């Protein structure tokens, strides 16, 4: 934390520079990914699906607006699909890349410098369902995926604080301060209400 001091007629203005959270947001995504069978033949049915290895590769500020920042998050995950083909079970594994934009609502964005982005996977990708489709003449397995990403933008914030310095004549000496162990207000417990 850094402090700067500027003298004015009414007192001293101190500028405190510190890291502060500019904005934070989480967002759910529901993309559909398409996976071709290994031999481009039409599978009979999908037997199972698992999604593993989700990770964020990169994140950064895409666009800064007046009261909003758009953050881009890039990452990957692996989709494993078991399917039946001509009475046999086959497995295919595909690495899927994602690139998502998450808007963060903020106030006073122009007062933040050196913005940094922190991102995380709030909910790991899971399969909501699979289906065999014909995509452009090719037998394809579609997987409906759901995951949630979170982002936080941190930046340098400047806070100006006006502080006054009392005159030397107004300073109270420590030995003039009155302290007492007696209560400041006495209540007569024996007195009765006149009503």
Image (cartoon, rainbow, N blue to C red):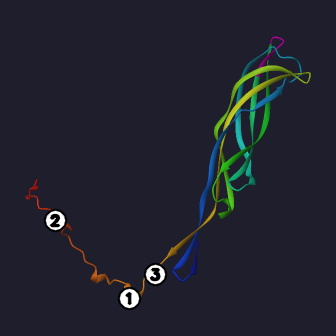
Residue under the point 76% across and 24% down? 81
Residue at the disc numbered 2:
186
Residue 100: image quadrant is top right
Residue under the point 78% across and 19% down? 83
Image vertical order of residue 25 relative to residue 32, above or below? below
Mark 3 Cα-neighbour bin, 10 Å: few <14, some 14–19, many ≥20: few
Q: CA distance from mark 2 to mark 1?
A: 34 Å
Does residue 38 show up magenta in the picture?
no
Residue at the disc numbered 3:
165
Q: Which numbered dot is residue 23?
A: none
Left or right: residue 183 compared with residue 74: left
| Furthest residue in direction right, as rendered | 137
Residue under the point 69% across and 47% down? 103
Front-most of 18 and 69?
Answer: 69
Q: CA distance from mark 1 to mark 3?
A: 11 Å
- In the image, which is nearer the foreground, mark 3 or mark 2? 2
Image vertical order of residue 115 relative to residue 128, above or below? below
Residue at the disc numbered 1:
169
Q: Tag 2 or tag 3, which sits nearer the N-term?
A: 3
Element assignment for label 1? helix
Q: Tag 1 or tag 2, which sits nearer the N-term?
A: 1
The residue range painted magenta reads 82-87
The percent coordinates of residue 166 (x first, y second) are 43, 82
């Amino acid at each position: 934390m850094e402090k700067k001091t500027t003298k004015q007629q009414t007192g001293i203005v101190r500028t405190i520079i510190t890291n502060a959270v500019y904005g934070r947001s989480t967002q759910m995504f529901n993309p559909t990914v398409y996976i071709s069978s290994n031999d481009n033949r039409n599978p009979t049915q999908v037997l199972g699906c698992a999604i593993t290895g989700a990770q964020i590769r990169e994140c950064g500020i895409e666009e800064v607006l007046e009261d909003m920042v758009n953050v881009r998050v890039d990452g990957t995950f692996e989709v494993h699909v078991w399917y039946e083909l001509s009475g046999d079970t086959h497995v295919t594994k595909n690495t899927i890349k994602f690139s998502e934009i998450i808007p963060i609502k903020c106030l006073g964005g122009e007062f933040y410098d050196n913005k940094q982005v922190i991102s995380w996977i709030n909910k790991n990708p899971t399969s909501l369902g699979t289906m065999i489709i014909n995509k452009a003449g090719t037998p394809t397995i579609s997987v409906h995926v759901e995951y949630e990403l979170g982002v936080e933008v941190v930046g340098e914030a400047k806070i100006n604080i006006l502080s006054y310095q009392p005159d030397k004549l107004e300073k109270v000496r420590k030995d003039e301060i009155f302290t007492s162990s007696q209560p400041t207000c006495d209540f007569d417990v024996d007195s009765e209400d006149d009503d």
